[in-house]
Image (cartoon, rainbow, N blue to C red):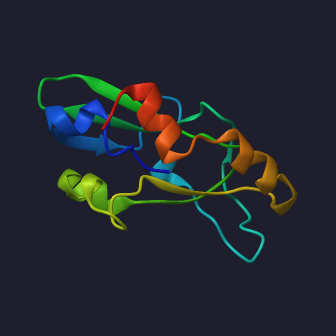
Amino acid sequence: MCLAPGHVAFEKGITSVTYDIGNYDRSKNAVSGKRKKGGMHLQPGTALALVTCSDGSEYKVVSGITGKLIEVNQRIVDDPSRMGSEGEGYVAIVLSKIEKIEGIKTSLLTEEQYRKIKNVK
């Protein structure tokens, strides 16, 4: 999971990222083994992180799919400027069940569809 390149938070300037979203601190997620035992179960819309911008505005980063939280990116907490870096700027890794992957892929927007909705060039 990551923020779309055209997200308004990038324009405003991201000053901090936290995985402590109130009820849970996602950075405390502990996963072990091949089956990723201990991974938090997520649903679409489940908050993963909170991004704060230089003007004080805050944006929740939510899961777009059902799955287990495998890993959070602690590097973006330490250095929020990494959020815009391809490959380094991800928020979290979420693992879905293999039998649900095709259904999930068809429900997601392509980059072109996203740009059309958001009027991003």
Residue at point 60%, 30% (across, down)? 45
Answer with left or right where residue 37 lies relative to residue 8.
right
Determine whether 72 is above or below 10 in the image. Answer: below
Horizontal side of residue 51 vs 79, given as left or right: right
Quick one: which residue is furthest to the right in this view? 99
- Is residue 29 shown left or right of residue 58? right
Q: Report which quarter residue 73 is drawn in.
A: bottom left
Give me the residue at 48% from left, 46% from top. Answer: 111
Residue 72 versus residue 96: which sits nearer the camera?
A: 96
Number of numbered discs present? 0
Q: Quadrant of the C terminus?
A: top left
State whether residue 81 appears in this view: yes
121 or 106, nearer to the observer: 121
Residue at image x 36%, y 27%? 119
Q: Whole-percent x and y of residue 36?
A: 71, 67
Q: Please give the name of the residue rendered at 41% of the width and 36% of the height, measured from the top-left corner.
A: 115
Residue 88 in the image: x percent, y percent? 33, 66
Residue 71 x, y percent position in the rendering: 53, 62
Look at the image and tell me whether residue 21 can be seen: no
52 over 89 or under it: above or below: above
* Front-most of residues 113 and 70: 113
Query: Residue 27: x, y in percent?
Result: 46, 52
